[in-house]
Image (tube, helix red, strand yellow):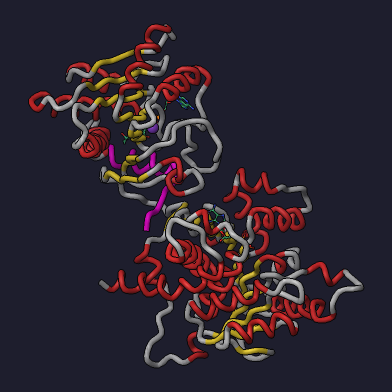
Amino acid sequence: MIAAWGVEDVRAAEKAAMADLPDGELMARAAKGLAKVLEARISDVPEARVVGLVGSGGNGGDTLFALARLARADERRELLAGIAAVLVSDRGAHEAGLATAREAGVDVVDLSGGADDALDAACDLVAEADVLVDGITGIGGSPGWSDSVAGRCRALFDATDDEAYVVAVDLPSGADPAGLVLDSEGVWADETVTFGVAKPVHLLGTAPRCGLLTLVDIGLEMATAPVAETLDHDDVAALWPVPGPDDDKYSRGVLGVVAGGESYTGAPVLAVTAAVAAGAGMVRYLGPPTPTGLVRATVPEAVHGTGRVQAWTVGPGLDASVAEDDDADEGDVRQVTTAREALDSGLPCVVDAGALDLLDGQRPRAGARTLLTPHAGELARLLSRVEDAEITREDVTADPVGHARRAANALHATVLLKGSTTYVVPPEVSGLPVRVSSDAPAWLATAGSGDVLAGLAGMLLAAGLDPYDAGGVAATVHGLAGHEANSGGPVRALDVAHALPRTITALLRHAAS
Ligand SMILES: NC(=O)C1=CN([C@@H]2O[C@H](COP(=O)(O)OP(=O)(O)OC[C@H]3O[C@@H](n4cnc5c(N)ncnc54)[C@H](O)[C@@H]3O)[C@@H](O)[C@H]2O)[C@@H](O)CC1
Ligand SMILES: Nc1ncnc2c1ncn2[C@@H]1O[C@H](COP(=O)(O)OP(=O)(O)O)[C@@H](O)[C@H]1O
Ligand SMILES: [K+]
């Protein structure tokens, strides 16, 4: 599990640690860890050139102390061709860090005051750099470049060689430390070396700009709960419902699927296939004749018609608008009624696609376990209805966690918001961290892959997981199955469903070894 704490909590933990440590010890630990990573990254680069971009705060301090360590370590070996620091801020740089770097022989170019020749010299340096260390802002930074440094920073990053390895100190400068503002100008790093614990910027929608995440232990003890977390393979394996000798198909969980209609016939096949492939005790399909015929033909393990179920997946390929259409097919209209009955039941429910259009608020039975699985457009539509306001898809993508949280609070449900980063957001009152998966291949952006996810998540609810765990596990396993189906190339949704058994077996074997 990688967990991330908010900036205020990190600062409080740093303060508590500093109270028991000599002055400067925490920054010394950070700089030592950073220097070790830098040494490892340049170990096979002959005559490497390392350039640090240094802001006015603690982030620049870390960078200066780390460059000083590198310079001192190289005094005898003389393997490096140059170590330089570019001070980008008009407010100077961390005093002790700068003095230490100068003493150790680090070349310093100071851009404060804005002289053009200094900027030209700095651009020449970064153009030659094999490793660029981004120490402009850390957790004290606001998203984007502040006006006073924007021109310099743009010029420096424009001059950077594409081949240079960019190491961000604590976080990529310009990225929102809270991970909420996604489109701010700033650094995209190959690697981010962070200190103590991860911060939201490393896990939320800003994660792609952090590159590889490396954590340096500086001895922080966190007294609060994390705000975000990413499940690793062992976490998923530990949560996966593995049957025991006393289990039968009913105790493993019967999933009811209300999906599709006379026009949308593929979604039920995909959702039912996924639930069966993921190991449901039994899957019961409810639907009109054409999709029923297709499910019978393609998934012989499924049963049909009403009967016992322990959880529902409702909505893939469901067209809720037929209820208002006098010319609609009778079977399709009945399917909407069946979907409403599932939503009105007190049973755990994955509410996907068309079934989201049937919700205006909380499900009628208080306490019914509910996992909503919208993409950004569906969440915008749902929230617009629930809040009686105009909320667009763009609003949701600009602040995915905030919007998912509002829906979770209003509907007393966990919201799994789909996209290149998938967020599982429980209602605020739970106090649980947002779960984030961002490792899925972009090839999963293909019609029907959401239907597979809905079947998979429903199977987990039927097996007894709560919506929060079912959502987190389903999102991670879905992404892994996307890789497993065809690593590095196109995948069709049905192949993702068929890859589930192999994916789950690999997870369980890895955890057992
Ligand atoms: N406090 C501590 O005990 C420790 C702090 N550490 C380092 O210190 C960092 C935090 O230091 P600070 O609180 O000084 O803050 P930062 O170093 O993150 O940055 C603050 C400075 O950047 C400038 N700034 C803010 N937003 C900007 C923007 N958008 N564009 C350009 N400049 C901007 C501000 O003028 C301010 O002076 C951490 O991220 C970490 O790297 C580590 O050494 C670990 C220990
Ligand atoms: N760029 C992307 N990278 C990784 N996964 C993605 C990306 N875009 C979408 N996905 C995933 O693909 C699935 C698409 O689901 P959805 O939009 O409901 O499609 P459909 O309704 O056609 O099945 C979701 O699980 C989503 O998280
Ligand atoms: K940084």
Examine the rendering and report whether any part of residue 21 can be seen. no
Q: Nearer the viewer, residue 17 or 219?
A: 219
Give the image location of residue 245, x and y in percent: 37, 91
Residue in the picture at 74% in, 84% down: 289
Give the image location of residue 304, x and y in percent: 65, 89
Does the magenta run of residues contain 484? no
Residue in the picture at 53% in, 19% down: 147
Give the image location of residue 93, x and y in percent: 34, 19
With respect to residue 109, does 283 lie above or below? below
Point out the stretch of residues depicted in magenta: 1-18
Residue in the picture at 66% in, 73% down: 266
Which secondary structure is most common in the magenta stretch? Answer: helix
In this picture, residue 215 sits left or right of residue 403: left
The quadrant of the picture showing ligand 2 is bottom right
Figure quadrant of residue 408: bottom right
Does the magenta run of residues contain 11? yes
The residue positioned farthest toward the right in the image shown: 326
The image quadrant where one finds the N terminus is bottom left
Figure quadrant of residue 230: bottom left
Q: Nearer the viewer, residue 509 or 214?
A: 509
The residue positioned farthest toward the left in the image shown: 76
